[in-house]
Image: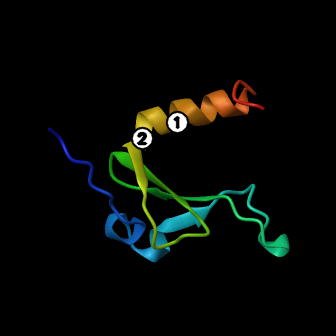
Amino acid sequence: MSTNTCITALEVADESSWFKSSYSDTANGVSCISVATLTNNVAVRDSKQQNGPAFITPSAAWSSFIREVKTGRWAG
């Protein structure tokens, strides 16, 4: 049996490494995600929960996802 380990965002990268999505609307209190670029990975967190969990994915997978989003494939 395997166990899942929840890694908090600040265990992954210090606060200065994180940046908010350009789609975040901080003026109206609406936030989105924050991203931190690591050596071979990208970490993603909820920008409203800065000390919360972080999702970590390989840089190549994140780049592929971003390309797909920009093409509109993931539009609702």
Mark 1 falls on what kind of element?
helix
Residue 25: image x %, image y %?
A: 79, 65
Farthest residue to the front: give it: 1
Residue 70: image x %, image y %?
A: 71, 33
Q: Quadrant of residue 69?
A: top right
CA gap, disc 1 to disc 2?
6 Å
| Residue drawn at the location 76% of the way across and 31% of the way down | 75
Farthest residue to the right: give it: 28
Above/below status of 2 relative to 12: above
Rendered image: mark on residue 63: 1
* Total tally of numbered discs in the picture: 2
**Left or right of residue 58: residue 35:** right
Q: Nearer the viewer, residue 22 or 26?
A: 26
Farthest residue to the left: give it: 1
Above/below status of 16 relative to 46: below
Q: Nearer the viewer, residue 52 or 34?
A: 52
Residue named by callout 2: 59
Instruction: Count neighbours of disc 1 (C-alpha within 10 A) and say few if under 14, some if 14 to 19, many if 20 or more.
Output: few
Residue 60: image x %, image y %?
A: 43, 34
Q: Quadrant of the C terminus?
A: top right
Q: Quadrant of the N terminus?
A: top left
| Residue drawn at the location 51% of the way across and 72% of the way down | 50
Residue 41: image x %, image y %?
A: 37, 47
Instruction: Count neighbours of disc 2 (C-alpha within 10 A) and say few if under 14, some if 14 to 19, many if 20 or more.
Output: some
| Residue drawn at the location 61% of the way across and 69% of the way down | 48
**Left or right of residue 54: residue 45:** right
Mark 2 falls on what kind of element?
helix
| Residue drawn at the location 38% of the way across and 71% of the way down | 10
Q: Quadrant of residue 71?
A: top right
Question: Mark 1–mark 2 contact, CB under 8 Å?
Answer: yes
Q: Amino acid at mark 2?
A: Ser
Q: Amino acid at mark 1?
A: Ser
